[in-house]
Amino acid sequence: MTSPAAIGVGADALPESCDLLVVGLGVTGAGVALDAATRGLSVVAVDAHDLAFGTSRWSSKLVHGGLRYLAHGQVGVAHESAVERGVLMQTTAPHLTRTLRMVVPLTPATDHLSAALTRAGTAAGDLLRAGARTSAQVLPRSRRISAAEALALAPGIRRQGLRGAVLSFDGQLEDDARLVVAIARTAAAHGAHVRTRVRATSVSGNGAMLLDERTFSSLTLRAKAVVNATGVWAGTLAPSARLRPSRGTHLVLGPASLPDLRAAVMAPVPGSRNRFVFVLPQPDGTRYVGLTDVPADGPVPDVPEPTPQEVDFLLDTVARVLEQPIKHADVLSAYAGLRPLLDSNGSTADLSRRHAVLVDDGVVTVVGGKLTTYRRMAQDAVDATGLACGPCRTRTLPLLGAAPRENLDPADRLQRRYGTEADLVLTSAAQTTGWSSAELASPLAPGVPTLLAELVFGVTHEGATTAADLLERRTRLSLVPAHAELARPVAERVLARISP
């Protein structure tokens, strides 16, 4: 493998032809580029906007084992999710993942049948983990815990009538956008041309017309095969892909909301025995509350917006299990993502999360699925191209920065987000800017956890060209608007110092 390559911007110096063109650089498109490049194919991967611009950055940041899908009889999807969760947590990205404790409080509103079903469900999750051969050290067995244990993990849950809780374990990402960046950079390190701000205006089985969004120059790229990995926008390039997007909304709370939270809290959705709203503690101290599952009809926006009704639904649902309800004033921000679900009868909550690979006029379109199963989706998409190449290698291929979690310090922000590349982030930033190591290792502002070196690395190695790239997708500071405003002048200073 060559040394880690930076992400490119624009269409300058792209080859005139390649084996495979990938359109879309969310988690699936980046995964396709990596899969194909490691099989020995020449790859060009483009996105009209930026890495992780669409759905991939709007997730719950969970690495799901697929337990919910068992309730819908989707055994294959559940098993695939459990397998891919284990691959992410143990092999490909252990530095970006961690074990998350999840607590379902047993309150007076939880009848004994619901409690029994919850415990049975978590026991089924244990079987999924065992079947996927995920170590019990990574994901321990679920169990019933006492009220005292539940309150120690989640002090904010309602105490009156608390009978204990069901404790289970799942995977959590440091950051979903960071996963996409790591996959894309690993693809580039294996020879793929990964470019942002390049739009595919038309595609066929033989290539595409590409438009450089910076210079508005166009070029025709010849390719032996094309993969359309544009998610909810897939129908614009492949009209036969009939999607029914579902909107998932999350709220972002500050650390003062539910202080000392050491586990995710799961609040049952009224009227449902297999849907929950989660309160998820994040590594930066924030908490996410999510998520909804409602149809997103009409034109697909670049950036979806939560509705007031969805915000109320999330707050009202979690209030049922908390001692003190979360107020609207406690919500720092809200975000929404659109799931690219295949159209079929029934509610979006019941639609299958199984991915599909469609071939139409030589263009391979991959839709459906979920973030956890991106690697398998990519493998199936490359297989569907019919290109002569080697076998899939990504199941055992660590991403850039990957290292066993026991070798990393969880209190070290750079190690949590960059793994073994933490030192590279600092040294390359010093070489590029001339700023001191102390300045580069300092937070951008009081109360803002991001380090100055992260912004520099985002520009030099990760293809960021605007303050929005840095604040919204390389660091996620935009999820706390006050942090983003404090950091914006620093981001602009970094861009001015490094950009030609």
Image (cartoon, helix red, strand yellow):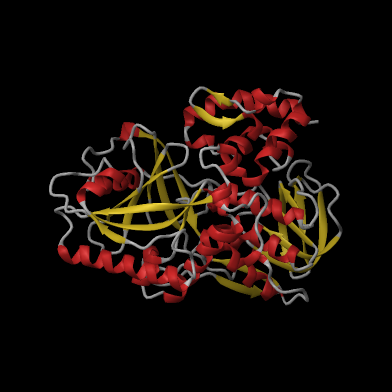
Say which quarter of the image contains residue 160. Answer: top left
Q: Examine the rendered structure and indicate whether residue 473 appears above or below residue 36.
A: above
Please tell me how many numbered marks the rendered image carries: 0
Say which quarter of the image contains residue 330. Answer: top left
Quarter holding the N terminus is bottom right
Q: Which of 417 and 253 is in front in this view?
A: 417
The image position of residue 63, as x and y in percent, is 48, 57
Q: Nearer the viewer, residue 343 or 388?
A: 388
The image position of residue 75, as x and y in percent, is 42, 75
Q: Is residue 207 left or right of residue 159?
A: right
Q: Examine the rendered structure and indicate whether residue 289 appears above or below residue 133.
A: above
Residue at left 34%, top 31%?
A: 256
Q: Is residue 185 left or right of residue 82?
A: right
The image position of residue 50, as x and y in percent, is 65, 46
Q: Which of 51 and 97 is in front in this view?
A: 97
Residue at left 51%, top 42%?
A: 410
Q: Examine the rendered structure and indicate whether residue 103 appears above or below residue 448.
A: below
Quarter holding the C terminus is top right
Residue at left 83%, top 53%?
A: 14
The image position of residue 130, as x and y in percent, is 44, 71
Residue 110 is at least partly visible in this image = yes
Residue 238 is at least partly visible in this image = no
